Image (spheres, rainbow, N blue to C red):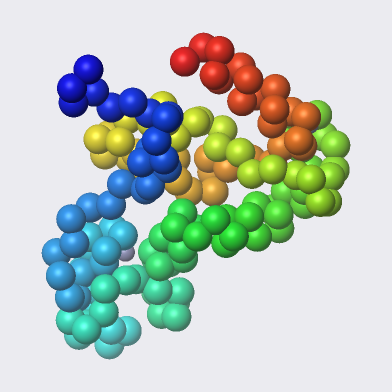
């Protein structure tokens, strides 16, 4: 049907929803104003960054969602390759899973991006991941 969004047949649902950027001096991730540590505005910057300890690490949050490998490293470190369902440890075959599937996220909700942070990632072994994917396909 015209205009109907046909997730998950496309990959568009995987892209993180981003706010409209206000321009230099504002953060692309959270839209908040960016200041230097001395309190002066920083019009040349476009991300909050861990390089300035008083700031939220918006640049890293974006990197996790934008670059699959970084998400994998973060989750490997957190879960140590242990399957969230059956507890099996599979150093080579573990898979990164979205607990709440991205194609079911209401992208217009104000807090939609929490599904793109590591709290929505879990480790699954190949067997459990296959089972979960099969179940999701069956109900959707
Ligand atoms: Zn920010
Ligand atoms: Zn498992």
Could you tell me residue 54's position as x and y percent? Answer: 39, 74
The residue furthest front is 1
At horizontal 32% and vertical 30% (from top left) the residue drawn is 106
Q: x%, y% of residue 103?
A: 42, 30
Q: Quadrant of residue 30?
A: bottom left
- Number of callouts in the render? 0
Ligand 2 falls in quadrant? top right
57 or 104, which is in the foreground?
104
Residue for point 54% across, 48% down = 118
Viewer can see residue 114? no
Q: Quadrant of residue 32?
A: bottom left
Above or below, comparing residue 86 to residue 68 in the picture = above
Where is residue 123? Give x, y as percent.
69, 41
Residue at the extreme left of the image, as rendered: 22
| Residue 126 can be seen, yes or no | yes
90 horizontally vs 95: left or right = right
Compared with 120, 101 (above or below) is: above
Which residue does the image show at 22% across and 17% down from the upper left? Answer: 1
Q: Percent from the top left, x then y, of residue 72?
A: 63, 55
Q: On screen, 83 above or below 91?
A: above
Residue visible at 44% across and 80% down?
A: 51
Q: Is residue 57 left or right of residue 109?
A: right
Give the side of residue 78 with respect to residue 111, left or right: right
Is 75 left, or right, of 31 in this rendering?
right
Q: In the image shown, does 31 or 40 lie closer to the viewer? A: 31
Q: Using the image, determine if residue 52 lies above or below residue 28.
A: below
């Amino acid at each position: 049907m015209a205009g109907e969004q046909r997730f998950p047949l496309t990959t568009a649902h995987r892209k993180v929803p981003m706010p409209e950027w206000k321009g230099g001096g504002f953060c692309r991730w959270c839209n908040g104003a960016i200041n230097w540590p001395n309190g002066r505005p920083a019009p040349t910057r476009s991300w909050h960054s861990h390089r300035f300890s008083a700031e939220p690490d918006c640049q890293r949050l974006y990197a996790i969602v934008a670059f699959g490998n970084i998400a994998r490293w973060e989750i490997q470190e957190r879960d140590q390759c242990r399957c969230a369902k059956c507890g099996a440890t599979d150093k080579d075959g573990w898979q990164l899973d979205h607990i709440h599937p991205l194609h079911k996220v209401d992208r217009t909700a104000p807090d939609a991006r929490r599904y793109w942070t590591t709290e929505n990632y879990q480790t699954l072994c190949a067997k459990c991941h296959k089972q979960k994917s099969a179940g999701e396909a069956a109900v959707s």
